[in-house]
Amino acid sequence: MKNLELQNFSVVEMDTKEMCEQNGGINPFLGFAVAYILAEAALNPRAHYKAFMEGWNSK
């Protein structure tokens, strides 16, 4: 059996800030989507609760 040696691939572990910079940052549309969902839930909480319960109790 042949001895296999590990090669150095120059792999470096990145933290969250470095990954965000490398990947181009946070998607701005994500913030708009979250704000829209929270605004809709705040303006009509009964409808959201009803929809949640219908989904929870469905078979």
Image: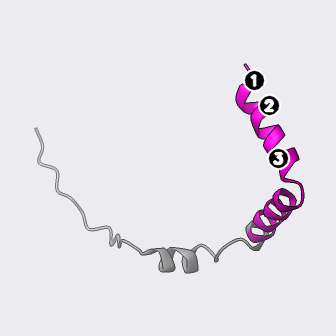
Mark 3: give few (<14), some (14-19) or many (20+) Cα within 10 Å. some
For label 1, the residue is 58
Give me the C-alpha separation between circle 1 and circle 2: 6 Å
For label 3, the residue is 48
**Which segment is the magenta one?**
31-59
Q: Amino acid at mark 2?
A: Glu
Name the N-terminal-most of marks 1 and 3.
3
- Residue 33 sits inside the magenta stretch: yes
Percent from the top left, x then y, of residue 54?
A: 79, 31
Name the N-terminal-most of marks 3 and 2.
3
Disc number at residue 54?
2
Percent from the top left, x then y, of residue 34?
A: 76, 64
- Vertical position of residue 15 compared to residue 38: above or below: below
Q: Nearer the viewer, residue 49 or 33?
A: 49
- Residue 18 sits inside the magenta stretch: no
Q: Nearer the viewer, residue 30 or 52?
A: 52
